Image (spheres, helix red, strand yellow):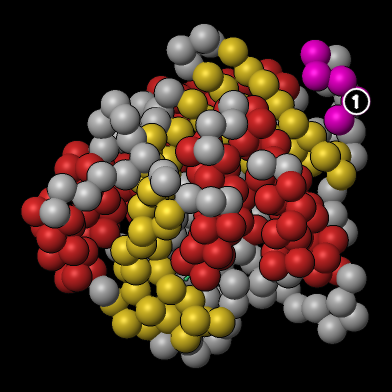
Amino acid sequence: MKRIVTIQDVSCVGKCSLTVALPIISAMGVETAIIPTAVLSTHTMFNGFTFRDLTSDITPICEHWKKENIQFSAIYTGYLGSFEQLDLMKKLIDDFGGKETLTIVDPCMADNGKLYPGFTQEFAFAMKDLCSKADIIVPNMTEASFMLGIPYKASGYDLSYIKDLLRQLANIGAKKVVLKGIEFAEVQPEIGDVKGKIGIIAYDKESDSFSWYFHEKMSQSFHGTGDIFASVFTGAMVRGKSFKESYSLAANFVVESIKATLAHDDHNTYGVDFETAIPYLVKNL
Ligand code: PXL
């Protein structure tokens, strides 16, 4: 059985980070080892959340694993709360990464043009440094802009702007980049009629090639969907799906989860009903 390790917080309520990574990657038939980086009563979109930092547990956990010769098919890092945790992830990648281990960094720290509470531009540059050690990074448009230190464009860009962004992101160091949340205001002849849709354009540095997947745009956005995306993407890559199959399945699963959520009259925005969509995921794996 393949085993991955994912490193992110436990938000006890508000489905995101480990409370989505664990059930989703497990449902994909992949053993999911974890390092919880902090325990919060809820994710940071609530007011008044509690926060217990677990940074000091990370090194002892890794040291024990090294003694036990524990190995992973993939390392997947998500939400990280401090510069020290970013440094510890670099060490973890040095210790447990390698040819047989796929390293995926989700630079989870921003969306819709804004950094999440507590993050700064300086943190985004430090996250960029962690991204230099990844095989694959999966930023959204906001995270990409903060890491590159350029203004976030909500609209009005074209395919050549996105290709340039992707090349700059690949120059950070990863072999592959998956850029999420792209919306073109106009038809882009090279990739067809993507107007009114939302999607992904990915870049493979080794073959210098671009690929893409666009789908319908949902009427509402929800917290935690980036974590769901990264979890499915990681699980699919480890299960041997191709790069494009993996990010397309991840996008489709997010859409299915949002549809399931919107079907509830009393839905809220702090987490999606991914549980209802799990049979879809398993069937399409
Ligand atoms: O979904 C990203 C995420 C993860 N973890 C925590 C968060 C957020 C987004 O706000 O607050 C604690």
Residue at 85% over, 15% down: 189
The location of residue 182, given as percent across then percent down, is: 71, 38
Q: Quadrant of residue 149?
A: top left
The location of residue 11, given as percent across then percent down, is: 48, 76
What segment is highlighted magenta in the picture? 190-194
Q: Is residue 94 left or right of residue 190?
A: left
Residue at 41% over, 44% down: 2
Above or below for 253 versus 215: below
Q: Is residue 256 left or right of residue 125?
A: right
Q: Is residue 68 left or right of residue 192?
A: left
Viewport quadrant of the C terminus: top right
Asked if the residue at label 1 sits under 8 Å from ligand 1, the reply is no
Look at the image and say whether residue 180 sits in the magenta stretch.
no
Q: Nearer the viewer, residue 146 or 238?
A: 238
Mark 1 = which residue? Answer: 193
Q: Is residue 3 left or right of residue 139?
A: left
Main structural element of the magenta stretch: helix, strand or loop?
loop
Above or below for 177 versus 147: above
Q: What kind of residue is marked 1?
A: Asp
The location of residue 81, given as percent across then percent down, is: 35, 65
The location of residue 205, given as percent across then percent down, is: 48, 16
Q: Nearer the viewer, residue 198 or 76?
A: 76
Above or below for 52 versus 164: below
Outermost residue, front side: 1
Residue 143 visible in the displayed image: no
Residue at 59% over, 77% down: 14
- Circle 1 packing at 10 Å, graded few (<14), some (14-19), many (20+), is few
Residue 184 visible in the displayed image: yes
Residue at 87% over, 44% down: 216
Above or below for 149 versus 227: above
